[in-house]
Image: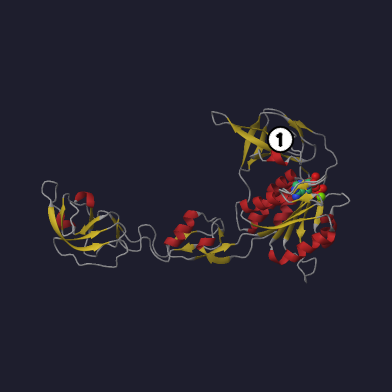
Amino acid sequence: MTLGAPTASPPLSVTEHLDRILGSVTRLPAVTIPIAHALNLTLAEDVHAAVSVPSFDNSAMDGYALRRVDAAAATAETPVAFRVVADLPAGSAENPRLGSGEAARIMTGAAVPDDADCIVPIEDTDQGTQTVLISRAPQAAAHIRREGADVRTGDTVLTAGRVLGPRDLAAAAAVGVSDLSVYPAPRVGVLSTGSELREPGTPLERGQIHDSNSLLLAAMIAEGGGIPIQLGSVPDDNNAFEEILRTHADQVDAFVTSGGVSVGAYDIVKAVLAPLGVWFGPVRMQPGKPQGFGRFPVAGEPTTAATGPAIFALPGNPVSVFVSFEAFVRPALLTMAGRSQIFRYTQRVTTSVGWRSPAGRAQYMPTIVDWDDAGTASIRPATAGGSGSYLVASLAKANALALVPEDVTEVFAGDVLTVTLVS
Ligand code: AMP
Ligand code: MG
């Protein structure tokens, strides 16, 4: 790697900007909701078993419940006959008395009669329904699933902080719990700005482009455990922009906007939000240098109050949007969602090609990770134009972001970089 000489750089590093964001957002208040709605949410309180699992002794096999001593002499050559006095499908509430030489036909999951001490599987019988021949002596307590063998009433089944997956929901249901205390998914309003933007699918006139950022952001929010609320796009008009934020400010936990944050004549996001106390400035990164972050004041509250929804004002270029979301928005949304693991795993990977990187700025290069036959990873830039921030179509090929440190101006083939797998 080539290290560059120090240059005049923007005052805020990526880490400093992220720290300010994470210092400002907090997890949302916990809510109690039905288990069926809790997938991917973070558990706020431990879950204790309301009932044992199993909650009663039950049969692990289709077979016959009986007293073991009565069948102790059974062999294939000298089977022992039992009178079948009951038939117990799963769900049966019956608890038939079993005398000596008596058996109950029983199906998997049915409660074992108190008088029985083992189950003989149908494979060791002639499957009779009036009388049954037992052709093998059973083991003690054979094929009985004991009450509480899995968990007992009061046991802790799930601990607070767990991100709820399918098996956690099943475990909660099995132990008799119907509602869970969780941190809710943050609701995030997504708003694109730019008079050049048209809905995807609309034919374009000269100077127009399709709004891809709205979809990119909404999808990343959903992937990151948030609930995207698509607010569409607004032209570069201060009033239209402010109006749509005001209308939705009390319905969202955060806004993410794209475009209009640089120093151009029509950079309306900054023009509207900076006077409301939202911070705007350059961050030492490429792409994604112009950033804005703060809170959008809710109507009736003083503009200085840090109570409104968080607002992330990202630059407009799609690659910048992607990188900014990964660097700043995703960790913040995961914090709001109560997660303790808010960063993706990184690994150190060797690059197979070189490229240039700006001095004094951390470069986030969209890359493709390749694995050779031996399972060794290497990376190469996903786009011909490197980290060029307008290369949205090529961005789809990337499955990782490689981080080039601030002081590096050239990366050479064979250098090892820190890489974040993003898909
Ligand atoms: P801006 O930050 O508003 O100057 O936008 C920077 C670049 O990103 C311009 O080339 C815009 O046309 C482009 N851009 C802005 N918003 C979007 C969007 N929603 N979808 C795709 N490209 C966009
Ligand atoms: Mg714009």
Q: Is residue 219 visible?
A: yes
Q: Position of residue 31 (x, y in %)?
A: 58, 66
The residue depicted at 24 percent of the width and 64 percent of the height is 113
Res 315 visible: no
Query: What residue sits right under mark 1 in the picture?
Result: 383
| View extreme (bottom): residue | 300
Specify the quadrant of the image occupied by residue 58: bottom left
Quarter in which the N terminus is drawn: top right
Query: Residue 168: where, in percent of width, then height?
Result: 48, 56
Q: Name the residue located 73 percent from the left edge and 43 percent from the top edge.
A: 319
Q: Nearer the viewer, residue 162 or 172?
A: 172
Quadrant in which the C terminus is drawn: top right
Q: Pick the residue in front: 279 or 248.
A: 248
Q: Note whether 111 is above or below 197 in the view shown.
A: below
Q: How many marks?
A: 1
Q: Is residue 228 above or below residue 12?
A: below
**Above or below 68: residue 94:** below
Q: What residue type is labelled 1?
A: Thr
Front in this rendered view, residue 240 or 23: 240
Which x, y percent locates residue 345? 61, 44
Element on which disc 1 rests: loop
- Residue at image position (67%, 36%) is 367
Position of 31 compared to 136: left or right? right
Say whether residue 54 is left or right of residue 333. left
x, y (%) of residue 36? 51, 61
> Residue 279 lies in what quarter of the image?
bottom right
Identify the image's colour scheme: rainbow, by chain, secondary structure or one colour.
secondary structure
Check disc 1: other Cα within 10 Å, few if <14, some if 14-19, many if 20+: many
